[in-house]
Amino acid sequence: MPTRGAKKDLVSLADVASDLVPLLARAARLKSERKRVRLRNTLRGKNLAMIFEKPSTRTRASFEVAMNDLGGHALYLSSSDLQLGRGETIADTARVLSRYADAICYRAFRHTAVAELARWATVPVINALDDEEHPCQIVADLLTMRERWKGRFDGRRLAWIGDGNNVFRSLMIGAAAVGLDLSAAIPRGYRPTREAVDASRSIGSRTGAELVFADSPEEAAKDADALYTDVWVSMGDEAEKSQRETAFRGYQVNAPLLALASPGAFVLHDLPAHRGQEITDDVLDGPSSAAWDEAENRLHAQKAILEYLLTRG
């Protein structure tokens, strides 16, 4: 873990890539302690300001409970209730909230807005989702895979089926950082930029992780140790709904696709799910689904992230 010094942000998962393995270990320990009702007050007296431009279930609940479990306090701030929604600049909002809170998490429409907040804030800023990345989700996803694979990622392969969206862009970084091979079936035109792919592969070159793009969901799923999918139409893409549903037809995670994976393979979905589109009910609710463990692990991942940023030293 880094030593105390200048404040650290989690705007991109790349910001914590070098510390991701110990961060996951800490999340696992915090989960174990909560199961034994052994809560710590590591964030006693700390306050988290949470700015939300988009609706949320798991992100908001997990951050609030995480702060409460660790002795701190979370303050929910809807953008429509802030002067930010009436024209106050992000820079001025950052300056003010930095005087009140010990950290700020921001669920935003635009990545540039999160980066701007981090630029002007004097306290850590956490990206709670934007149009380019969803780093907190991937920490929870990797924690779920770590549990299923007894702490080891080497020799494992994850198949992504669907959109090359913000979740996938963070997943590329996270998989590369922990040495997890990633095979992605994404229609052409919906894949991430070459720059994003190259940045992920650069991290993977140091860990031995491989990132490949498959020509079909079946190719990606064959002999994979886990399958991961997400909605075809993310928040902000509603105008493309019809176009996207046509492009992603055939990219559904269902029983026949799961049957191509390795024995014991499990399925991930970051939720909410559009049942009957990107995933079928029998898979999401079936014995191979890890989606509910994954959702729970948002809480433990958030705790580890908050400790990492607020108790450095």
Image (cartoon, rainbow, N blue to C red):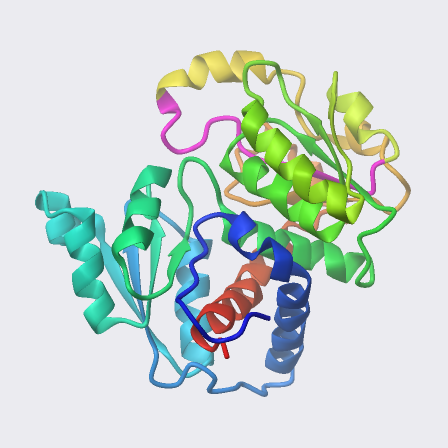
Percent across and percent down for residue 287 are 77, 49
Decide: is 107 above or below 250. Answer: below
Q: Is residue 117 located in the magenta-colored stretch of the structure?
A: no
* Residue 99 visible to the viewer: yes
Residue 178 located left or right of residue 3: right
* Residue 192 visible to the viewer: no
Question: Magenta region, mostly helix, strand or loop?
Answer: loop
Q: Is residue 232 located in the magenta-colored stretch of the structure?
A: yes
Q: Which residues are magenta?
A: 224-238
Percent across and percent down for residue 63 are 42, 64
Percent across and percent down for residue 192 are 56, 26
Residue at x 37%, y 63% (from the top left corner) = 124
Viewer-closest of 85 and 113: 113
Decide: is 151 above or below 292. Answer: below
Residue 249 located left or right of residue 71: right
Quadrant in which residue 2 is drawn: bottom right
Residue lying furthest front: 5
Residue at x 54%, y 59% (from the top left corner) = 298
Residue at x 10%, y 52% (from the top left corner) = 83
Residue at x 67%, y 44% (from the top left corner) = 203
Residue 91 located left or right of residue 15: left
Quadrant in which residue 208 is drawn: top right
Viewer-closest of 285 and 91: 91
